[in-house]
Image: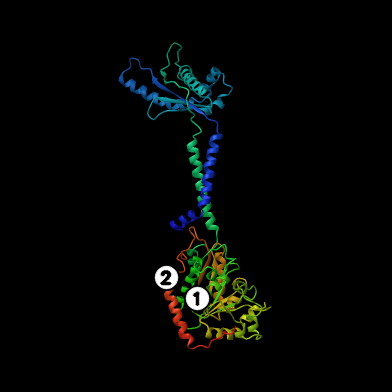
Amino acid sequence: MELRDYLRILHKNWILLLVLLIAGIAGGAGYAFMQAPKYEASTQLYVSVRTEGAATGDLVQGTTFARQMVASYVDVIPTALVLDPVIEELSLDVSAGELAPQVSASTPLNTVLLDISVTDEDAEQAAAIANATAASFAQAVQTTLERPQSAEAISPVQITITQPATAPTSPASPNIPLLIALGALLGLAAGVGLAVLRTVLDTRIHTLSDLEALTDKPMLGGIAFDPEAAKRPLIVHADPRSPRAESFRSLRTNLQFLDVADGPRSFVVSSAGPGEGKSTTTANLAIALAETGARVALLDGDLRLPRVADYMGLEGGVGLTDVLIGRVPLADALQKWGANQLFVLTSGPVPPNPSELLGSSAMDHMLAALTEHFDYVLIDAPPLLLVTDAAVLSKKTRGVILVAASGKTKKQDLAGAMRTLETAGGNLLGVVVTMLPTKGPDSYGYGTYTYGSTHHHEQAAVEMTRAEVKGRRGRRTKVGQNA
């Protein structure tokens, strides 16, 4: 993935990132406030070698010896030799092993200094333990560690307390700002990790790049998500100035420029699975094409779960199945819709053998008659992965327009639908993405201009279509006028 992909992931999952960031901050703050405050008191010792009256060379040797000894003294301080007298002096109710973690010693590099630090929940006691430890260590050096061989002799090592410990006024731990910052960092890291994992595991179609990875066919249009689509499916008719209606007009324009070669303009509209918006897309596209003055025939080829009659508000008792079995003439079954030259052929009664009817020679003859007298023929077909109807129809038309729903259609399903179409010998013309979010990183620039504004490409497409219609009407016999 590129940098922009990661930015899109972060933008898309910003709520998750914010929630985990706040959770991390709250967790760090909670942990910090649950910890008992501890105070740290420090004292400093100076280690030297007695060299009264010694020459300069002896002084240098004594200093070198003191540095070597200081490194060993660091490990001696938190031992029972030093801490037992401290416990006894301060009457502490702990053992040397329990007190040792509270006491630490260190020495600055290339010095003869010893720093003793003591942490305790009581500031006064921390200072008392530090001072008692320093005194106990000095005594241990004089009497045990560096004790001279004769009782009258003085130990060559001298310990001097240069900085006594004082009671601290503020606790050394917990470091609340540090813990809060650490919690925020962990929360943010967890959020980024979950966002990336969520994106990697998500196999649904979201963006144009998802489609480009599956097919080299063009994206014919992007239809924005409309929560009111169920109440007003024919948005081009119900609200012609809305941006969503304009997106269907953009689809119309792309379809008109997709294949300008002479020949029948019959198209199948299908999808990989159900509920992806293929029927509403077909109906709105038909209305948008009829707005240009073209004669459009809309067929409900979904003989299993027809929707066109309900969307268009037409009687669906007589339709495609009646024409295919010869019960009703085609001209009588076509129903004119609206003020433009849009004719609808509903599905009619649901037959027991939809695939056989759609693949019959009667279907060929009917499509030949429709393409002869109409500028566009649109067929709403069932999903490709569920039944073979759309694949059968694809061989009888110019090609298939595949509808995929953003955030719903899975990549493997869309790839499977394209393989099914390729196996059947159909021609995939392009893909239409529906249910696109109107905001966020996955939104698509489907157009925000109003219906009354000027758009040069759209106007050019309309004029081209009207010119084609005038030329064709001079050579065709009108059908369906009495429907």
Q: On the image, numbered disc 1 is attached to which residue?
A: 291
Note whether residue 12 is visible.
yes
Nearest the eye: 288 or 202: 288
Q: Check the image and report above or below for 50 versus 410.
A: above
Note whether residue 218 is visible.
no
Q: Check the image and report above or below for 54 versus 10.
A: above
Mark 2 secondary-structure assignment: loop
Colouring of the image: rainbow
Q: Position of residue 233 (x, y in %)?
A: 57, 68
Query: Which of the 4 quarters of the picture holds residue 344?
Result: bottom right
Marks 2/1 in contact by CB < 8 Å: the verdict is no
Find residue 144 and name its label.
none
Q: On the image, numbered disc 2 is attached to which residue?
A: 455
Name the residue type under label 1: Glu
Crowdedness of circle 1 by 10 Å Cα count: few (<14), some, many (20+)? Answer: many
Query: Which of the 4 quarters of the picture holds residue 51?
Result: top left
Q: Position of residue 398 (x, y in %)?
A: 52, 79
